[in-house]
Image: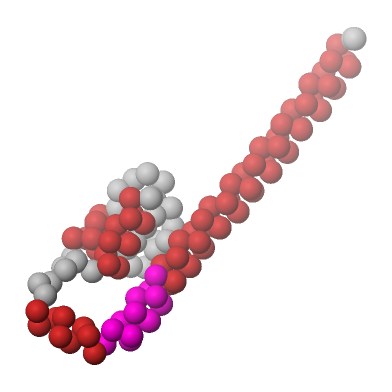
Amino acid sequence: MDRRELFERLSQLEQNVNRLNENMAALKDVAVELVEENVALQLENDNLKSLFEKDEAAPKSAQAHQTKAKKPLRSKDNLARLYNEGFHICKGELFGKHRQGDDCLFCLEVLNDD
């Protein structure tokens, strides 16, 4: 194998690796979008379930409110779970997006807000 052929093969291999990197980056972006959409749908589903349960238990809840102490909201537990899984729960355009491992003061404020 002469130098020219070696150089051509290396150049071709480099192009293949670059295309593979581009494809991986595109797939990663799609995966992130799907995870974010899944989180948003899970939240919406949980909210709808809680509304449905609230409508069914409306007569019972009036009696239960008088006799039971105040419990933490189930929705707050769901938000804390999502935050711990690495997603933004703060209000605004970041909601449902991946936090990239960094803590978010706005999300923490939502969790600590009573």
Residue appearing at x 15%, y 85% in the figure: 63
Residue 81 lies, in percent from the top left, at 33, 55
**Frontmost residue, 99 versus 38:** 38
**Frontmost residue, 106 versus 85:** 85
Residue 16 lies, in percent from the top left, at 76, 33
**Frontmost residue, 61 versus 1:** 61
Say above or below: 56 vs 6. below
- Residue occupying the far top of the picture: 2
Say above or below: 43 vs 84. below
Residue appearing at x 84%, y 15% in the figure: 6
Magenta residues, as a range?
Answer: 46-58
Which quadrant of the figure has residue 80? bottom left
Does the rendering let one see residue 39? yes
Taking the image as shown, residue 39 lies to the left or right of residue 77, namely right
Total labels: the figure holds 0
Residue 77 lies, in percent from the top left, at 28, 61
The question of residue 53 being in magenta is answered with yes
Image quarter in which the N terminus is found: top right
Say above or below: 97 vs 114. above
Residue appearing at x 48%, y 67% in the figure: 41
Taking the image as shown, residue 56 lies to the left or right of residue 32, namely left
Task: Determine the main secondary structure of the stretch shown in magenta.
Answer: helix
**Frontmost residue, 62 versus 35:** 62
Which quadrant of the figure has residue 51? bottom left
Residue appearing at x 10%, y 82% in the figure: 66
Residue 46 lies, in percent from the top left, at 39, 70
